[in-house]
Image: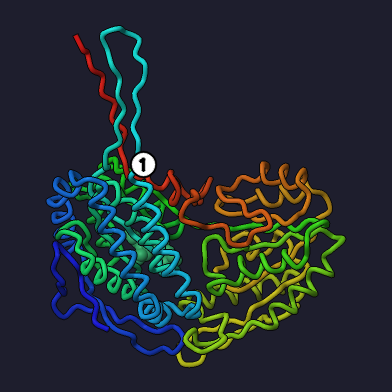
Amino acid sequence: MKGMHYIDGKWLDSGDKLIDVMNPATGERVGTVPNGGKEEAKAAIDAAAKAFSSWSKKTVYERSELLMKWHDLLLEHKEEVAVILTKEMGKPLHEAIGEIEYSASFISWFAEEAKRLYGRTIPASHEDKRIQVNKQPVGVVVSITPWNFPAAMMARKMAPALAVGCTFVAKPAKNTPLTAVRMYELAEEAGFPKGVINLVTGSAREIGAAFTSHPDVRKLTFTGSTEIGKELMKQCADNMLNLSLELGGHAPIIILDDANLDLAVQGVMASKFRNAGQTCVCGNRIYVHRAIVDAFSTKLKEAVAKLKVGNGLDKDVMIGPLIDKEGYEKVDEHVQDAVEKGAEILIGGSGNTDNDAYFYQPTVLLNANHDMLVMKEETFGPVAPIMVFDEDDEAIRYANNTRFGLAAYLFTDSMSRGTAISEGLDFGIVGWNDGSPSSAQAPFGGMKESGIGREGGMEGLEAFVETKYISMKVR
Ligand code: ADP
């Protein structure tokens, strides 16, 4: 597949400057995209700025209709887009299809919800005054998204932005730009006017710098690492850009002694091993009550033993490759470090790196402690370290002892213990007996160094509007 930039309604290249997109399961080339930089970014922003005045003046009903056409086309083509996604990213095909459906759910939800972006009137303190509050689109939005959810991370930004009347420039991740290209082809078919949606591929550093320095940009929305998020936040200061940041996480999973163990194992499997552990909301450390640690570990081991590792396009594969060599080495380092510091490998613990493809066996570690890297840094791999606790307060303290605050999970059938723990957790998202809490209608985002702002839900729509207060003197 040969991807291109999409700027002002035209498909463009960058001469012979190309990026090879590789299949992480085979080491083979899947296709190419242009290796663009600041010129392409500038052209795309200029186009978006030009299109803003007419797009923002359309009624929300017109914009929603186009979004719904895009939604329908995406679902009609979901298998085909999912195959591209699996080829460039590695996740099992059933997960890729799930991601396309999940992406489509953001488009339809925001197409509907934007119709209810109400302002308000406020009783004034003077007889001759009226106070009105309006919501209006923030302006040109630029987005930078990561490789682990190439479709969903872009859709969840793009849908609300377009629905409220912003115009958009996307930069997908270098490893996974082809899914975005195909989604843009479908969006073009849906009929978005030229300049409303733009896509540039290439150098992250150059495009990021162009995004944050162009005077016509009003908002940057970024999903990626905390490290790059901080860098971008500094860059945004000069133009005082509006900013949403979805950054790293280090999710704790707390399993109490009264938990339904089958449900807990099911939740851990969903949270920990989905996408081979490469999501920012993946459980990273599992705290299990001492009374049930043996029973829980045995059940988890049985479930993990059933996971088939391989090429995501092959039938029954549940764990695809890690994205690249660096990702693999980090996972292996975390496991080696844990073993050196006293962890016991219950299952897994090694990988396979033939033919530039990096597979890691799903791994469960017992006797984890807080000196281990795996308990402190984002592993981004299929490794589940288990540490024992005795008291609920101790579990909350362990869980909160991190600079991150994205997702946390707890498993208990007790309303009172669960309520106390969920209220005590310093995390933006809490899954209670639920290993996969993300959904279009709920606010997703982190506290502390996991980011600023929320995506999804009403908050995800508010992220793309400015509030304007109009004070009217009526006589
Ligand atoms: P990940 O490990 O998920 O790739 P990164 O933060 O490295 O996390 O990358 C997330 C996205 O940010 C990718 O699209 C990447 O190309 C982009 N990116 C990386 N470095 C920069 C940078 N200096 N400026 C702008 N974007 C960047």
Percent position (x, y) of residue 406? 55, 52
- Give the mark count: 1
Tag 1: Cα neighbours inside 10 Å, few (<14), some, or many (≥20)? Answer: few
State the image quarter where residue 238 is shown: top left
Percent position (x, y) of residue 464? 33, 45
Quadrant that contains the C terminus = top left
Given residues 345 and 12, the one toward you in this image is 12
Q: Is residue 449 above or below residue 20?
A: above
Residue at screen point 36% across, 80% down: 80
State the image quarter where residue 240 is shown: top left
Three-letter amino acid code of the residue under disc 1:
Arg
Q: Is residue 313 left or right of residue 469?
A: right
Q: Is mark 1 within 8 Å of ligand 1?
A: no
Percent position (x, y) of residue 247? 47, 55
Residue at screen point 25% across, 49% down: 166
Percent position (x, y) of residue 184? 26, 68
**Which quarter of the rendered image does ligand 1 occupy?**
bottom left
**Which residue is identified by label 1?**
116
Given residues 124 and 431, the one toward you in this image is 124
Q: Is residue 99 above or below residue 445?
A: below
Name, please, the residue furthest toward the bottom. 355
Quadrant that contains the N terminus = bottom left
Residue at screen point 31% across, 70% down: 73
Question: Under tag 1, what secondary structure?
Answer: helix
Residue at screen point 48% across, 71% down: 98
- Colour scheme in the image? rainbow
